[in-house]
Image (cartoon, coloured by chain):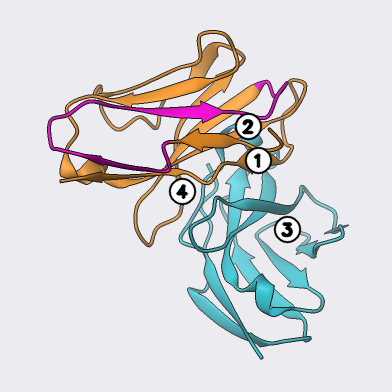
Chain colours: A orange, B cyan
Amino acid sequence: GAGVSQSPRYKVAKRGQDVALRCDPISGHVSLFWYQQALGQGPEFLTYFQNEAQLDKSGLPSDRFFAERPEGSVSTLKIQRTQQEDSAVYLCASSSPAVRANTEAFFGQGTRLTVV
Amino acid sequence: DAKTTQPPSMDCAEGRAANLPCNHSTISGNEYVYWYRQIHSQGPQYIIHGLKNNETNEMASLIITEDRKSSTLILPHATLRDTAVYYCTGGATNKLIFGTGTLLAVQP
């Protein structure tokens, strides 16, 4: 596709349930990022991949959050034992056809997770 | 990581220039200033970025002060479709630090 695609667009989970959020980056983009955006706030960095390598996971809020990108393209953000405070929009972004810092990132529309 | 400060909201008349300020006094010498905007229910959209020099593209101009402690995003002729939350961020592409942004309301 032409842009970053995320699925599902909306997810309702019961507290304690595990969820998996998918991101299809722009074809050929080396870098992939996950952000969490709470209502009324700016996006907050979660983690960063360069190809299949997870180079920065400093923003993951707890060990219930896990991200992977096994083949360097599609990525999955998994949240185990969801809690109400996990309710947010989860944004995926990709950048750069080659490894190069300081370029623009392209964001998907996000997955809105509601934990009830 | 650079912390940024922006006014929470601004109004602008359609067709006029919109000037959005940002303070980033803690930005380090090799950190770029990025501007993104977010229209309701969409992901952030890249606008422009710069290091020291002023930059211009088809969407906007970016004016960075000589001491790099602040910058201004200029939309030269605002339209109703420019109504959005505008984020000034510091850092590198691989770790953008967003604040709460400025809600720009373009009035007809």
Q: Which mark identifies residue A106?
A: 1
Give SS at disc 3.
loop
Q: What amino acid is labelled 4 in the image?
A: Pro
Q: For the residues tagged 3 and 1, is the chain the same?
A: no
Gap in angstroms between the C-alphas marked 2 and 4: 15 Å
Gap in angstroms between the C-alphas marked 1 and 2: 5 Å
Gap in angstroms between the C-alphas marked 1 and 4: 14 Å
- Which residue in the protein does label 3 denote? B67
Q: Which mark identifies residue A94?
A: 2
Gap in angstroms between the C-alphas marked 3 and 1: 29 Å
Question: Crowding at label 2, few (<14), some or many (≥20) Cα neighbours within 10 Å?
Answer: many
Residue A24 inside the magenta-drawn segment: yes
Q: For the residues tagged 1 and 2, is the chain the same?
A: yes
Give SS at disc 4.
loop
- Which residue in the protein does label 4 denote? A43
User: Is mark 2 in CB contact (under 8 Å) with mark 4?
Assistant: no
Q: Is residue A116 above or below residue B21?
A: above
* Residue at position x 73%, y 58% in the image: B67
Q: Which mark identifies residue A67?
A: none
* Residue at position x 77%, y 24% in the image: A97
Q: Nearer the viewer, mark 2 or mark 4?
A: 2
Gap in angstroms between the C-alphas marked 3 and 4: 27 Å
Q: For the residues tagged 1 and 4, is the chain the same?
A: yes
Location of residue A69 in the rendering, given as x and y in whole percent from the top left corner: 50, 15
Q: Nearer the viewer, mark 3 or mark 1?
A: 1
Question: Crowding at label 4, few (<14), some or many (≥20) Cα neighbours within 10 Å?
Answer: many
Give SS at disc 1.
strand
Q: Which residues are magenta?
A: A8-30
Q: What amino acid is labelled 1 in the image?
A: Phe
